[in-house]
Image (tube, rainbow, N blue to C red):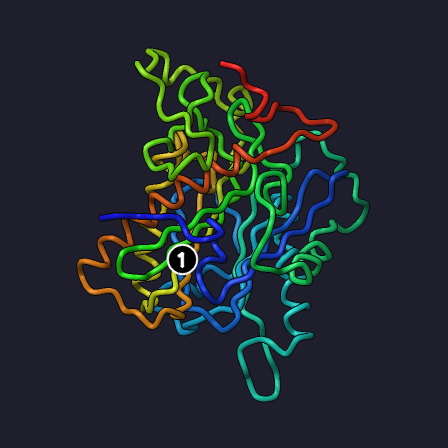
């Protein structure tokens, strides 16, 4: 089994996808959207205890809709669910969506993370700004995009550090590509103990998040961290939300298995993950653009790559975060130990 990063090391190395980000620096929040050039097979797996979602029931393999047009990831907690309406509006203007008679209904599942107490100004008046941010994100969609303090990761936090938006890709020996996009806002930590070393280090390709490897020897206090909001254990006040995508030809059930496998990347890159206070969720997407349907051996590689690629994307989110006025936590690049 041999993995290498794609040419961009972004989810857009998966043919048929574009990413749009929109952010509000005053708000310290934002929206990211994954746009499918053609409807893509999709499913979802939720393992966190406090999810916030829209249109996820239709993604179960036993339900009727086989393909979707976009996935929305947003800050703003429950208010951020409005972003999907903005994405829908933009796609409807473009004539994109599921045809019902003479109407087009864009299928846009979405998920949100909690970033309401991160130092940003949330006094937005009667209506939250997320619908307009969702619309703007569609207009910004491209194959090259920013990670770190961008889009849905703009106001994200993890234990002791600023979170962010991450992405990575893997090209398998079979020619199949896997890509991840993740907004990291976990209750847990992404670094080992109080060091600069990422838990995801064993999966790093090159020096994509610093090339530090794991500390040697491992410190005895690897689990000695102050969890985010430790003394305010509010359900829904965290969450890591993500998309794992491939250009392979998959069924809806296989797309769900892809999402399940990608959760392994959460466990490899965040400690602890999938807590009752997190809404951890992964959407699985298959564009089918490679024309390759994986055989049993390729399937094993595909699911292994899903976890590894997600772990790398999580570390890259924190590695790329940048400071901004009013931040309540430092960025990774400011660490010295």
In this rendered view, identify the residue nearer to me: 23 or 78.
23
Find residue 161 and report its horizontal and vertical position in percent: 55, 25
Q: Secondary structure at mark 1?
A: strand
Residue 240, horizontal then vertical, whole percent: 48, 41
Asked if residue 43 is positioned above or below residue 73 in the image, the reply reads below
Task: Give the farthest residue toward the left.
Answer: 296
Q: Position of residue 205 (x, y in %)?
A: 38, 39
Q: Residue 40 falls in which quadrant of the image?
A: bottom left
Instruction: Check disc 1: other Cα within 10 Å, few if <14, some if 14-19, many if 20+.
Output: many
Q: Residue visible at 66% across and 46% down?
A: 30
Q: Nearer the viewer, residue 261 or 127?
A: 261
Which residue is outermost to the right? Answer: 125
Residue at horizontal 41 percent and vertical 25 percent from the top:
212
202 w.r.t. 53: above or below: above
Q: How many numbered marks, from 0 up?
A: 1
Residue depicted at 62% across the width and 56% down the height: 20
Q: Is residue 74 above or below residue 255?
A: above
- Residue appearing at x 39%, y 48% in the figure: 5
Q: Residue furthest top?
A: 220
Left or right: 22 in relation to 64:
right
Tell me the residue that label 1 is attached to: 284
């Amino acid at each position: 089994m041999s993995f290498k990063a794609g040419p961009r090391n972004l989810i857009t190395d998966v043919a048929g996808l574009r990413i749009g980000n929109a952010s509000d620096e005053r708000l310290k929040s934002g929206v990211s959207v994954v746009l499918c050039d053609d409807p893509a097979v999709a499913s979802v797996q939720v393992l966190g205890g406090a999810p916030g979602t829209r249109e996820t029931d239709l993604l179960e393999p036993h339900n009727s809709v086989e393909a979707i047009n976009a996935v929305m990831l947003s800050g703003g907690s429950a208010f951020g669910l409005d972003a999907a309406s903005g994405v829908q509006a933009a796609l409807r203007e473009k004539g994109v969506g599921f045809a019902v008679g003479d109407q087009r209904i864009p299928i846009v599942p979405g998920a949100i993370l909690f970033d309401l107490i991160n130092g940003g100004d949330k006094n937005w008046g009667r209506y939250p700004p997320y619908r307009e941010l969702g619309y703007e994100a569609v207009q910004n969609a491209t194959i090259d995009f920013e990670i770190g303090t961008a889009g849905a990761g703009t106001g994200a936090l993890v234990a002791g550090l600023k979170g962010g938006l991450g992405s990575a890709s893997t090209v398998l020996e079979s020619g199949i590509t896997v890509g991840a996009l993740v907004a990291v806002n976990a209750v847990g930590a992404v670094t080992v103990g109080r060091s600069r070393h990422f838990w995801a280090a064993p999966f790093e390709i090159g020096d994509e998040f610093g090339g530090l490897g794991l500390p040697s020897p491992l410190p005895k206090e690897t689990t000695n961290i102050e969890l985010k909001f430790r003394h305010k254990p509010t359900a829904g006040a965290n969450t890591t939300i993500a998309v794992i995508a491939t250009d392979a030809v998959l069924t809806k059930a296989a797309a769900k298995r892809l999402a399940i496998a990608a959760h392994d990347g959460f466990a490899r890159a965040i400690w602890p993950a999938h807590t009752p206070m997190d809404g951890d969720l992964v959407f699985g997407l298959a564009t089918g653009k490679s024309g390759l349907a994986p055989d049993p051996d390729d399937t094993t590689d595909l699911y292994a790559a899903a976890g590894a690629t997600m772990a790398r994307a999580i570390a890259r989110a924190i590695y790329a975060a940048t400071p901004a006025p009013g931040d309540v936590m430092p960025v990774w690049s400011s660490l010295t130990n």
